[in-house]
Amino acid sequence: MYPLTDSSAGKVRTTGGSSPSAAPLPPISPDPAFEHLLSQSSIYCYSVDYQTNRFRYVSPGIYRLLGYDRDSWQFSGPLEAFRQVHPDDRDCVHRIYSEINRELLRHDPAVRGDLSFVFTCRMKTRAGDFIHLSHHLSFPNLDHRGRPLADFTLVSDITALKVPQHCQLQIHYPTPTGNLICKTLSVTCTPAATELTRREIEILKLVAQGLDSQAIARQLFISYHTVCTHRKNLLRKAGVKSPVELVGWGRGVGVV
């Protein structure tokens, strides 16, 4: 899904496209009984094939957690999934994957499969709200040079834990003595909410109350066209396309 560095050549290769060292991996086909259990859970898991930049697997729990159809999500691919990350968190997620890449390169290729990573970010549900998710990431498939061929990630909702809005990354790796080392990095993002003007915040709160542009104009004693301009600017700054998504974004950043 994200660029990974070829440690031997010192070059960046994207995860899309073919690789001369390995063929695309077969899809993951879990046991039907296990699939049924996953469909009843509020977690989901997925695997991305870095040779094709496509999902090898998406569990049915994604519908229960985010409201998306599993088959449609899997067909759309990882890049479309990344577009559902909160606009304020997208740069942080890129930086997190860059740090994961650097951490892999710090370790001998023979032990990279023992590393695991946990990172947090907010993602948009089908209803337009944002929830805070924890991603438990590992690389079970590597080539003979220690380059990831695929990942496996377990995703859970941590919104109820009232975790900090900023993204975090935890890195777990074993030592030669068998001890497990864990280090945590905080990735500070610049929230788009700080770019909103006082008037835009007023209008966003009234949109959340269900008022249309005419009613907002009357309440704030400004013109209808001025309200429309502010609403267009709000959609642009939030990176969304509809009033429902805008209100969900506003709740996610604490404005509404």
Image (cartoon, grey):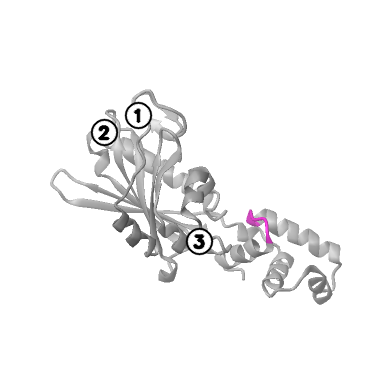
Q: Is residue 239 magenta?
A: yes
Q: CA distance from mark 3 to mark 1?
A: 39 Å
Quarter of the figure that contains the N terminus: top left
Residue drawn at the location 32% of the way across and 54% of the way down: 32
Marks 2 & 1, CB-CB < 8 Å contact:
yes
On the image, numbered disc 1 is attached to which residue?
7
The residue type indicated by label 1 comes to Ser
On the image, numbered disc 3 is attached to which residue?
67
Instruction: Point out the stretch of residues depicted in magenta.
Output: 238-242
On the image, numbered disc 2 is attached to which residue?
109
Residue drawn at the location 53% of the way across and 61% of the way down: 125
Q: Nearer the viewer, residue 102 or 24?
A: 24
Check disc 1: other Cα within 10 Å, few if <14, some if 14-19, many if 20+.
Answer: some
* Viewer-nearest of discs 3 and 2: 3
The residue type indicated by label 3 comes to Gly
Q: Secondary structure at mark 1?
A: loop
> Residue extending furthest left?
177
Marks 3 & 2, CB-CB < 8 Å contact:
no
Q: CA distance from mark 2 to mark 1?
A: 9 Å
Compared to 214, does 170 lie above or below?
A: above
Q: Nearer the viewer, residue 217 or 197?
A: 217
* Image location of residue 85, percent across then percent down: 52, 53
Q: Earlier in the sequence, mark 3 or mark 2?
A: 3
Q: CA distance from mark 3 to mark 2?
A: 38 Å
* Image location of residue 232, percent across then percent down: 74, 57
Compared to 212, does 142 lie above or below?
A: above
Q: Is residue 84 magenta?
A: no
* Viewer-nearest of discs 3 and 1: 3
